[in-house]
Image: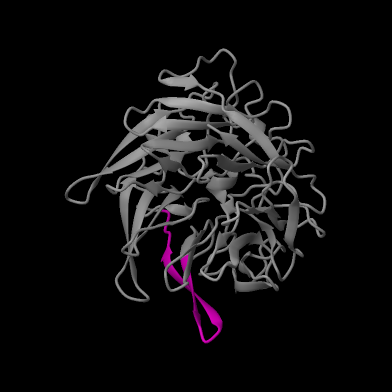
Amino acid sequence: MRARSAALCGLAGMVFAMMLSGCAANAGAYDPAHAVAAGSRSSEASEQTLYSFTGGNDGGNAATGLVRDGNGNLYGTTVTGGTSQCGTIFKLTAQASPPWPETVLHNFGCYADGKNPHGGVTFDRRGNLDGTTVAGGSGGSCSSDGCGIVFQLTPQTENVLHNFSAGSDGFGPGDGVVFDPTGSIYGMTPDGGSHSEGTIYELWRSRRQWHEHVIHAFTGGTDGGVGSLGLLLRDASGNLYGVAEIGGARGAGTVFKLHATSRKRWNLTTLYAFKGQPDAGSPYGGLVADAAGDIYGTTYYGGADGLGSVFELARSTRGRYRERVLYSFLGGNDGSSPTATLLLKSRELYGTTSAGGGSCGCGTVFKVDARSGSETVLHTFGSGTDGAYPYYGLIQDASGNFYGATVAGGSFGQGTVYEFAP
């Protein structure tokens, strides 16, 4: 957790810094004298707060991605709050106007069932909600707090699929999980593993039992180190793509590809090693890809001003990748320090910045043209009760409306779920 806790100043409560403690406000702080970046413009969209967390039984500190069901209801996690103050899984029921009614589907009890979920949940093929917690569980003692779990929430109960031990399997997962067609689960940890630099793991079910297998243990060298906040990206051939926050040939993180050579063996290929400023550096979110196989993501540092970037890896006919920084954040009205996975729609990349924008530096929603690199600010957080510090990305409905969450702000300062129409 070294790089993550230092870079994000306690990302909404990671294992070693469970609360914001004012840190996020200082990350990539806004300078009123700093002009808006060249190629950036503002176009405020219609934003509304769907729900403000109180920090009580309903949850607090919504460091979560969101998922949406066929009826438009939204699901996610809160790091704190709930009946034991150790986090929740929640549902917001869609209705014509806010606030949307909230239902707590599960209260984490701090111990065997997990503690402090980050990153949200994913629907599996049976309609269950699966995710991770950074602490709790019965696999080992990590600062006397448990080492985290992978969980599955069915309509009847919460089941622990794996208890991390802080050994070769890793610990402290702060991201969500993805599935393959057989129902196997894939994710990352930022710590532990055979080299103490994090892991990429697989869980599969056999005879009603779940089993865990580390498919790659980061070394901190050319392969990178510290598994990211973002989901792994799985292609049609079953390959996995992701980012490592540190390491690589230049120490500024990597983009990697994992290819399965057998059920138990995977080969990792480093597609690109970031160089750091003025190149991109320190990626925290996941990746998206277009139909041509070009890959896009964000970095927390790097870019022309060292305040984060949007990057592209363009695939050549030989399967190699050429990197370019599409946009460099300046920390002014355009935002800074993105940690989110991008959403790609019609050659436009939509995302959030965790800081910058407006007088409080509470973050932005932006879009970047994937061809020209021109950035447009769609919303600036910190005005009224709209929320502050969006660490995770966006989802979209069929009508083109976007949804996301913030870890702070709102009516009670405990985070929000918001909607905006660009």
Q: Nearer the viewer, residue 142 or 19?
A: 19
Which residue is located at x 36 percent, y 37 percent?
A: 347
Q: Position of residue 306 (x, y in %)?
A: 46, 29
Is 214 drawn above or below residue 315 in the view shown?
below
Q: State whether residue 85 is above or below residue 12.
A: below
Residue 205 magenta-highlighted: yes
Magenta residues span 201-220
Asked whether 50 or 407 is in front, the reply is 50
Q: Position of residue 338 (x, y in %)?
A: 51, 37
Evaluate whether residue 275 shows in this view: no
For image coordinates 58% across by 63% down, the residue present is 171
Q: Is residue 17 above or below residue 304?
A: below
Q: How many marks?
A: 0
Name which residue lies at 55% across and 46% down: 4
Q: Is residue 324 left or right of residue 252?
A: left
Residue 132, by quadrant, is bottom right
Viewer-closest of 255 and 87? 87
Location of residue 404 in the rendering, given as x and y in whole percent from the top left corner: 59, 43
Residue 226 in the image, given as x and y percentages of width and height: 49, 53
Main SS of the magenta segment?
strand
Residue 188 in sight from this viewpoint: yes
Residue ranking furthest to the left:
318
Q: Residue 403 lies in what quarter of the image?
A: top right
Which of these two is toward me, 271 or 47? 47
Q: Find the residue positioned furthest to the front.
A: 96
In the rendered image, residue 262 lying in the magenta stretch gets the answer no
Say above or below: 60 vs 323: below
The answer to which quarter of the image holds residue 75 is bottom right
Q: Residue furthest top?
A: 33
